[in-house]
Amino acid sequence: AQSVTQLGSHVSVSEGALVLLRCNYSSSVPPYLFWYVQYPNQGLQLLLKYTSAATLVKGINGFEAEFKKSETSFHLTKPSAHMSDAAEYFCAVSEGNFGNEKLTFGTGTRLTIIP
Amino acid sequence: DTAVSQTPKYLVTQMGNDKSIKCEQNLGHDTMYWYKQDSKKFLKIMFSYNNKELIINETVPNRFSPKSPDKAHLNLHINSLELGDSAVYFCASSQRPAPYEQYFGPGTRLTVT
């Protein structure tokens, strides 16, 4: 079964600093990878997704992620953190064959922005 | 317009009761899902339906019974509620089964006392 591991359940960065959230995947086939964000008391919103096209994926709100097969990683970055980025971030991998695919989520990383 | 809506947003009930959560999507998607998020924020899929047909059932207890009356609705009925059922339940939909983007509802916080 495919899986993702998010390193660091809590990450704190200063406003304006680089945001780096780590995600490593385990997959025997080329994976489809996603980053979702969950703001307090809300549902999940897709930030970006990798589906075997470009390895550098740009998403919403200035976030991007790079797929590195050699490192089995899909880390999420943002050059300059904003207070509004404070949220829970989830990495996910899609597994299964056509018709019964499902998303398997990592355990999440809570991002805190320090003023 | 809300893309994926759930009712109720909060549900507080006692052990042993039966309750339902409703989900509706107005995106025209073929596939709908139920996820459970526990107190540690861990998200796990419970069910998926494609065109009203059950596709995924992730070893969920029989007390949980999803029902899809049409493509736009996927309801979750829970019998004999237990303390461990307390969680946030999210409904989601996608145009096709994954890896297409899934759109999530706002969640239903279920508290069993």
Image: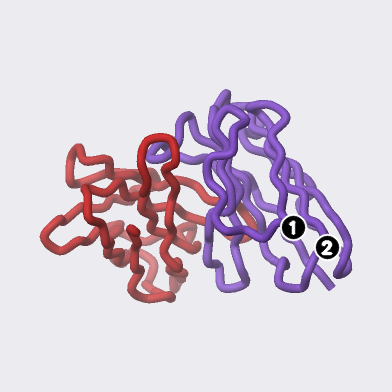
Chain colours: A red, B purple
Q: Is residue A57 left or right of residue B86?
A: left
**Image quadrant in which you'd find residue B82:** bottom right
The residues bearing labels 2 and 1 have C-alpha atoms spaced at a distance of: 7 Å
Residue where numbered disc 1 is placed = B63
Residue where numbered disc 2 is placed = B80
Contact check, label 2 and label 1, Cβ < 8 Å: yes
Q: Is residue A22 left or right of residue A103?
A: left
N-term mark: 2 or 1 = 1
Vertical placement of B85 versus A42: above or below?
below
Determine crowd level at label 1: few under 14, some 14-19, many 20+ residues with C-alpha closer than 10 A.
few
Q: Where's residue B62, x and y in %?
A: 70, 56
Quarter of the figure with the N terminus of chain A = bottom left
Q: Chain of mark 1?
A: B
Q: Please report the residue visible at 63 percent of the width from the left and 37 percent of the height from the top.
A: B4
Q: Residue furthest left?
A: A70
Question: For numbered disc 1, what is the local secondary structure?
Answer: loop
Q: Where's residue B31, x and y in %?
A: 54, 33
Vertical placement of B83 versus B53: above or below?
below
